[in-house]
Image (cartoon, rainbow, N blue to C red):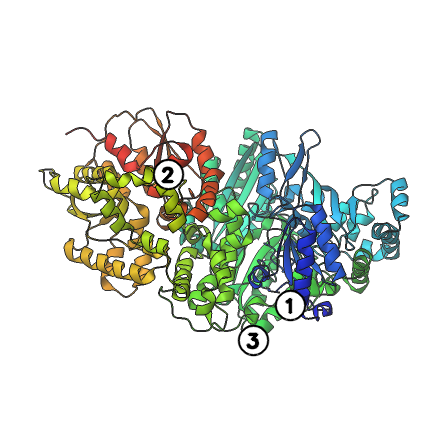
Amino acid sequence: MTVTDNRLDRNADELGRDLARDLERALDGEVGFDAYTRHLYSRDASMYAITPLGVVFPRHADDVAAAVSLAGRYGVPVVPRGGGTSLAGQTIGPGLVLDLSRHMHQILDIDVDARVARVQPGVVQDQLNRAAAPHGLMFGPDTSTSNRATIGGMLGNNSAGSGSVRYGMTIDHVRELDVVLSDASRAHFAPLDAAERIRRAQLPTLEGGIYRQLPHLLEQYATTIADDFPAYWRRACGYRLDRLADDPGFNLAPFVVGSEGTLVIATEALVDLVPKPRRTVIAVGHFTSVLGAIEATEDALACDPAAVEMMDRTILDLSRQKIEYADLGRTLEGDPEALLFVSFSGDDERELAGQLDRLAALWKRHGHGYHTILAETPQQQAPLLKVRKSSLGLLMAAGSGTRRPLAFVEDTAVDPKHLADYTRRFRQVLDRHGLEAGFYGHCSVGCLHIRPFVDVSEPEQVRAMRAVAEEIKDLVREYGGVNSSEHGDGLARSEFNREIFGDELYEAMRGVKRIFDPENRMNPGKIVDAPSMTENLRDAALPPAPPIRTRLTFDVVGGMRGAADRCMNIGLCRKSETGAMCPSYMATRQEEHATRGRANALVKALSEPDPAAALGDERVHEILDLCLMCKACKSECPLGVDMASLKAEALAHHHDHHGVPLRSRLFGAIRMLNRLGAAAAPLSNLPGRVRPLRRLLDRAVGITANRPLPTFQRRTLVHWFRGHRQLDAAAPQGEVTLLADSFTTFTEPGIGRAAVELLEAAGWAVRLESGGCCGRASFSKGLLDDARRKAGSLATRLVRSSAPGSPIVGCEPSCILTLRDEHRQLLPDHPDVRDVSGRVRQIEELLVEAIDAGRLRLGQSALSGRRILYHGHCHQKAEVGTAATVALLRRIPGVEVVELDAGCCGMAGSFGFESEHYDLSMAVGSDRLFPAIDAESPDTVVAATGVSCRQQIRHGTQRVAWHPLELVRQSLPAT
């Protein structure tokens, strides 16, 4: 059969309306049948796309059963889904998608003595590991997607990961499952004694039929099960009849692991936990070729490693282009063609050191590699592990337009002793078809994730892709390997299962499917009876992008749609405990509030016949609305999806259709408002403290009464600077221009004063630029024509009034960095914009250089002996990083500096002032930032570069947050 099931031939709109109505009545969870929700769930991290009839978000097992029951009544298949990070198309289908990640994500129990955890399917792997870590335990399988992969998805896929040489696969760690069967009945799978098996087999239910028929099937196909399964152990393909045949307890829980939702839907799992090693050390070998790295694997395996991972130059070069991975370049030696990461884990430091020494000696003796890094501390390992875990995303970033590195032969595995020869022949296949590829993966278990670059919008390329898939399938069989070793069958490989397993064993698997799912309701078209691997291709199905005039420049193939369609759905924006991307998803756990969801929504809108009109659609506006425009996705998303710019452009089109709201106009004119407020201070500060006036402002404009307004300062930075007497000494460093932004000038002039005094002490002649606004506020509200005028005006003024080539700095990251990012998007060909963008520097860089050169001397101050907790601005992290700020703070004598990894503060400029966004803003801050600050002693000094961050910290924790420049100024000796 194909995935276009004939049960859906009935008018889809009518069927969808009726089913949605009944689901809304029956479920406690939400139901989504609108066109945009359906499109968001038409994709996973594979090369496929199939639009479902609808999506449901169950809150509990009863909801799952009700959804399966109603889908069955309407003749609609069901597709269970976790994080949607599957690479072979397992979690997409034409029926009803069940997103088990939004609500069913509770860790129900951890039994430390028994070393087990009872979890719901939406629990994320890192979430479970964090909960188990205080007990010295962890979940054994370690996927690179551990920060967003759900346990349910790992069950469906039989996931493994880098540590599988020691810990095996998910199937090896599952004890019991609560499941919903295809007829919506419930069952509990666990080891059974003979009496219980007999009892269950007598039940007049689907469960009873399973226990009656499966033993007969095992007996009927006993010989082929024993003889015909691929010999290699690391398998994530087909149904694991071999495991069941050898199980005296006839436990169906591990048997259904890897069945990709085609047999049951798991609603609860009892999984094993393993002792967490106290220490891990890593050797990183540098090699001049991929084959050289692979050939060194045998020596590594002789030292009993926990993992052996390889990464080729393609990924290394891509990592060097991302500020997120900048630390790696400072760690490596030379310019390797490949790296081999060999990890050793345990509790005995001497034993681990001995393993490192033995490996280094073996590599030296056998001439493997030209350099080896020994990373023994978490600090040394962090940049290495960060890139290794991001290999997939980095490789995806190498694509251009619809030419992408695709997953269709990326999951084969052979015995490691054959890996070098196998890889050599694999490359020959690719060369024969003219395909390039990136290489990375798990050398310890013979699995390389090789992703050829293919453009499936070109029929000739599709034919080449299929030919390669068939040749590699035959090659892996020749070496006694497996076609899928951890990513599953899905739509990419199920078609080949008959050839992989042979006719008899394949018929046995078809029999399994009929026993569990006699009406073929459960994720049909996967594992058995699958469509061709070249059907349902995502890029081939996408219509040509209709023309649309944009105000911003999207310098990628395909313009604005191409910028959104760079998203390959790997789901890194669904992480919840590290980094800043994506703050709204962290607060809501809704797919449409992740960068991935928004990008997919924009792809749909920009594919409509009139894309400009589609961008004005209120559903599109709703999906984009909670984007805080923090820009974290620009750096943390390996593909660099810049949702802040995409939202700004979409807002501009929304304004074209619906007009510009008064509140947006007010925030876009923030510099004028702040100037007027400062001129009228202190009287202008009184309305902000009068509750009736605040409530009126809330009702009339939508500025929340729950948040304090900034305090205007009558003596502005400009006023102070006019009366400021610069140092008499000459300025040996020349001229520097300080951008007097709208906040440093009118509400926090003390920060600007500190900046001027520090720069002058460092030998600079400071010129204050206070004549205009950078346009950042207008940009964020979608007022792009206004932002363009402000950008051009400011750039021209800066060029005309400052010394050529002199640096331009600022105190507020979002403003100064607008000059080097948004201005170039607004006016890419403007010579003054190009000139200015090249001269923007971080003020912290200039001050660190001066301190290190001895031109700026800091002394003891009241800060000596204290701890400084620093929270970086999201735009700063995305554009230039926080290293310069942290370095400057650490040069204050006698202080301890700790940089928080607490994500976005949640304020995001005007976002936190907007009535409908206030609760979400506070939820984002309460996620990690507020608790981290609340946990500090009262003596800790809190620092933050962003004005919004300081406002949010004060409001959410009642703690004052200082700009780093204010703290450094305190250490400047009196003159």
Q: Residue at x 53, y 47 (%)?
A: 588
Label 3: which secondary element: helix
Instruction: Residue lying at the far left in this picture: please name it.
Output: 728
Residue 691's disc number: 2
Above or below residue 32? Residue 202 is: above
Q: CA distance from mark 1 to mark 3?
A: 36 Å
Spatial distance from mark 2 to mark 1, Cα to Cα?
Answer: 50 Å
Q: Is residue 312 visible?
A: no
Res. 635 mark: none
Which label's residue is closer to the chain start, 2 or 3?
Answer: 3
Under circle 2, the secondary element is helix
Between marks 2 and 1 in the image, the one whose residue lies nearer the viewer: 2
Residue appearing at x 64%, y 54% in the figure: 56
Q: In the displayed structure, does residue 100 sit left or right of residue 390?
A: right
Q: Amino acid at mark 1?
A: Asp
Residue designated by label 3: 460
x%, y% of residue 58? 66, 49
| Residue 624 x %, y % | 47, 56
Nearest the eye: 720 or 734: 720
- x then y, percent, for residue 834: 26, 60
Structural distance between the alpha carbons of marks 2 and 3 = 68 Å
Count residues near mark 3 (Cα–Cα under 10 Å), then give few for <14, some for 14-19, many for 20+: few
Q: Are marks 2 and 3 in contact (CB under 8 Å)?
A: no
